[in-house]
Image (tube, rainbow, N blue to C red):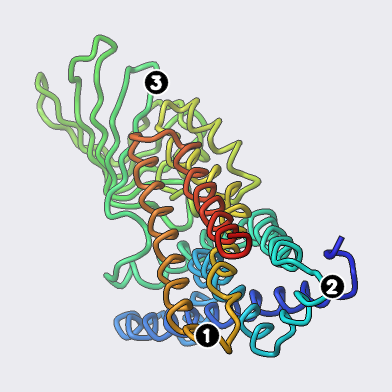
C-alpha cells in the first residue's frame, strides 16, 4: 500500500505541510485583521488597553479560523499537487505504475486526520476561548456603551409552581449567572396573563430568581415597587447560559450534554444538533475538498491550461462551501433534517470529486 511506503510518507509530509501552512497563513491574517478592528473600537473604552485587546484577538481568532479548514484542505491540496506536477514527480510516479488513486491516498489520509484533530481537539479549545472572549469583550466594551458579541435581547421560557413565564432581558451579566434590564411576563396555570415584573437585574439562584429594583404590574392591582423580589423558577444556570450561547461556542465533547439539557428545558435543539452533525461530517468535507483539488491539479504543466483549471478548482471549492452553508441554513430553520443538512454536501462533494477524477484518469 502506497500510504506506508517511502514515497507515501514523502507525499504525506508534503500534503500535511501544505495544508497546515495554508491554515496558519489564514489564521495569522484573521488574527491581525481582528486586532486592527478591535483597536479601532478600543478608542471608545478607557479599560480596553493594548494587552487586553491582544488577548481578546487571540481568544477570538481560533473560532473564526475554524471556518477556513475546508479552504485550507482545498488550497493546500492544490498547492501540493501543482508543486509535485511542476517538478515532474508525478510524471515519474506514473511512469512506474503509480495511479492517481494511489498517490491521492496520503492526501485523503492527511485531510481526514486534520478533520478529526479539528473536531476532537481544536474545536473544544476554540469554543472555550470564544466563551472567554465573549466575557472579556463584555467587560471591555459594554460598560462603555459599546457593542458586545452577545445578543441585543435574550428571551427565555420557564416553568415553576406559579405557572409559566416568558423572560426578556437586555443582556447577560458578565460576572454572575443573571440578566440585566429584565422583564418577566407571568401566566397563570390556565394560560391567562397574571402580571409583569420589571427589574434592573435578576440573579439566578437555586430554585428562584433574585430581582433587584423590581416593579410589578397586573390588570387587577396597582403597580408596586420592590427593592428586592424573589420569583420561583426551575431553570438551572447551565440552561440559562445555554439559551444565549450560540452553537459554535459549544465544544464537540460538550455538545451531547448540551442537547440533552436543552431538550429537558423545552427549548429548540435543532441548531445544536446541526452543529454536532456538521462537526462529525467535517473530515468527509475536507476529503471532498482534496478530491476537488486533485481533479484540477493533476494536469501536466507542459500541456498548458493549468491556470484555467486552477481557477475552476477554486470556484468549485467555493461552490461546495456555499452549498454547505446553504444546507446548514435550511437545517437550522427546520426545513431539512439536521443529519441530512450536515452530511449531504460533504457526501455529494466527495462523489462529484471522485467522478471528475474517474472521468479524467480512467476516461
When asked about the image quadrant of residue 255, the answer is top right
Question: In the displayed structure, would residue 90 be above or below residue 97?
Answer: below
> In percent of the image, x 61 and y 75: which residue is there?
298
In what element is the residue under mark 1?
Answer: helix
Question: Which quadrant does the C terminus fall into?
Answer: bottom right
Q: Quadrant of residue 258?
A: top right
Residue 315, x across and y down, in percent: 40, 70
Q: Which residue is mark 1?
A: 51
- Judged from the image, the secondary structure of the residue bearing numbered disc 3 is strand
- Relative vertical location of residue 143 with respect to residue 81 in this rendering, above or below: above
Q: CA distance from mark 3 to mark 1?
A: 45 Å
Quadrant for the N terminus, please. Answer: bottom right
Counting residues from the N terminus, which is met first, the one under dot 1 or under dot 2?
2
Residue 9 image label: 2
x, y percentage for residue 279? Answer: 57, 50
Of badges 3 and 2, the one in the foreground is 2
Q: Do the CB atoms of the residues marked 1 and 2 lie less than 8 Å apart?
A: no
Question: 45 left or right of 84?
Answer: left
Q: Residue at coordinates 32% horizontally, 44% vertically from top-left?
A: 212
Q: Quadrant of residue 358?
A: bottom right
Assign a secondary structure to mark 2. helix
Q: Nearer the viewer, mark 1 or mark 2?
A: 2
> Which residue does the image show at 41% across and 47% down from the upper left?
328
Residue 160's disc is 3
Mark 1–mark 2 distance (CA, rounded to whole Å): 42 Å
Q: Residue 332, labelled with which disc?
A: none
Position of residue 292 measured from the top left corner of the image (x, y, whole percent): 54, 64
Q: Is residue 296 above or below residue 328?
A: below
Amino acid at each position: 500500500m502506497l500510504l506506508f511506503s517511502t514515497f507515501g510518507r514523502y507525499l504525506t509530509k508534503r500534503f500535511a505541510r501544505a495544508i497546515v501552512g495554508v491554515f496558519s497563513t489564514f489564521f495569522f491574517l484573521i488574527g491581525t485583521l481582528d486586532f486592527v478592528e478591535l483597536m479601532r473600537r478600543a478608542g471608545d473604552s478607557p479599560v480596553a488597553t493594548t494587552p487586553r485587546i491582544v488577548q481578546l484577538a487571540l481568544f477570538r481568532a481560533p473560532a473564526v479560523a475554524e471556518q477556513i479548514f475546508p479552504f485550507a484542505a482545498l488550497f493546500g491540496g492544490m498547492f501540493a499537487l501543482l508543486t509535485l506536477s511542476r517538478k515532474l514527480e508525478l510524471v515519474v510516479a506514473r511512469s512506474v505504475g503509480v495511479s492517481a488513486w494511489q498517490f491521492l491516498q496520503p492526501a485523503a489520509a492527511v485531510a481526514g486526520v486534520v478533520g478529526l484533530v479539528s473536531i476532537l481537539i481544536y474545536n473544544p479549545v476554540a469554543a472555550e476561548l470564544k466563551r472567554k472572549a465573549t466575557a472579556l469583550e463584555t467587560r471591555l466594551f459594554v460598560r462603555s456603551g459599546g457593542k458586545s458579541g452577545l445578543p441585543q435581547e435574550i428571551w427565555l421560557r420557564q416553568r415553576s409552581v406559579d405557572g409559566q413565564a416568558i423572560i426578556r432581558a437586555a443582556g447577560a451579566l458578565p460576572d454572575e449567572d443573571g440578566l440585566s434590564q429584565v422583564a418577566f411576563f407571568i401566566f397563570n396555570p390556565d394560560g391567562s396573563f397574571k402580571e409583569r415584573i420589571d427589574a434592573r437585574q435578576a440573579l439566578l439562584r437555586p430554585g428562584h430568581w433574585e430581582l433587584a429594583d423590581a416593579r410589578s404590574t397586573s390588570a387587577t392591582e396597582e403597580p408596586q415597587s420592590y427593592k428586592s423580589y424573589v420569583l420561583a423558577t426551575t431553570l438551572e444556570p447551565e440552561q440559562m447560559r445555554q439559551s444565549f450561547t450560540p452553537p459554535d461556542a459549544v465544544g464537540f465533547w460538550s455538545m451531547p450534554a448540551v442537547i440533552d439539557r436543552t431538550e429537558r428545558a423545552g427549548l429548540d435543539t435543532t441548531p445544536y444538533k446541526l452543529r454536532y452533525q456538521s462537526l462529525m461530517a467535517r473530515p468527509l468535507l475536507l476529503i471532498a475538498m482534496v478530491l476537488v483539488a486533485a481533479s484540477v491539479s493533476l494536469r501536466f504543466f507542459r500541456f498548458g491550461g493549468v491556470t484555467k483549471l486552477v481557477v475552476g478548482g477554486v470556484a468549485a471549492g467555493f461552490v461546495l462551501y456555499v452549498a454547505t452553508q446553504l444546507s446548514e441554513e435550511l437545517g437550522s430553520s427546520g426545513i431539512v433534517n439536521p443529519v441530512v443538512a450536515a452530511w449531504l454536501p460533504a457526501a455529494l462533494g466527495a462523489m462529484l470529486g471522485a467522478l471528475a477524477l474517474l472521468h479524467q484518469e480512467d476516461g
